[in-house]
Image: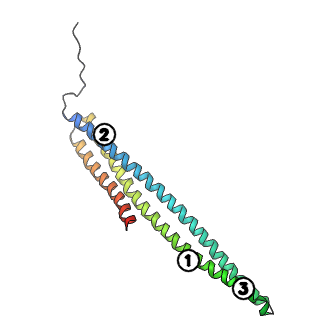
Amino acid sequence: MAEIEVKPEHADDPNTRRVGILVGVVGILLSVVTIASHRAHTDAVIHRTESNDLWSYYQAKKIRENTDEVAQSLLQTLSNEPAKIETAMKKLDAARVKYAADAEKLQDDARGKDKETELEERRALFFDVGEGLLELGLVLCSLYFLARKVFFPVLGVIAGIAGTALGICGALLGVWSFGA
């Protein structure tokens, strides 16, 4: 009985192997940019939460400062003997000054966290657009196996290069901003 040799449908096409490797490379780049995108989004959420916490603490300090100010006003208004309230007034004034200083520091810290959030959101945008372009490149390269048209992988490579460049820009944006 004669042996039957089974050949893949497009075994004679020299581009099949190259495009297959290209699809693998674009897939790897896509996974790297996708992970970076997810991490940037997570970092942005963490920074936003920290900022919100600091702003809440700032607000609490400002409320305490205001409460001490109101207490001082009430003591001055209701007291007939200034000598009796002098100790309480000094204590309230010291607390009010401390709360004001604490609030100022908290405000600066919260603004810093807001800036970190904006940076991470900007980085995430670079990664998201890069991810989209890499996905497009992966699909375009894969269309070669259906249509056998060389322009699909060419367009896929162009989209992949653009997506990789945006991913690199997102990574460098973090390095430049945190390194400075």
Cα–Cα gap, marks 2 and 3: 72 Å
Badge 2: residue crowd in 10 Å (few <14, some 14–19, many ≥20): some
**Label 1 is placed on what type of residue?**
Glu
Q: Which residue is mark 2?
A: 24
Task: Please identify the quadrant where the C terminus is shown.
Answer: bottom left
Asked whether, in this view, residue 73 is left or right of residue 21, the answer is right
- Where residue 69 sits: x, y (%)? 68, 83
| Residue at x 30%, y 40% (from the top left corner) | 24
Specify which label sits upstream in the sequence, 2 or 3: 2
Three-letter amino acid code at the position of disc 3? Gln
Camera-nearest residue between 180 and 25: 180
Q: Secondary structure at mark 3?
A: helix
Q: Is residue 9 above or below residue 124?
A: above
Q: Quadrant of the N terminus?
A: top left
Q: Which residue is mark 3?
A: 72
For residue 104, which numbered disc appears in the image? 1
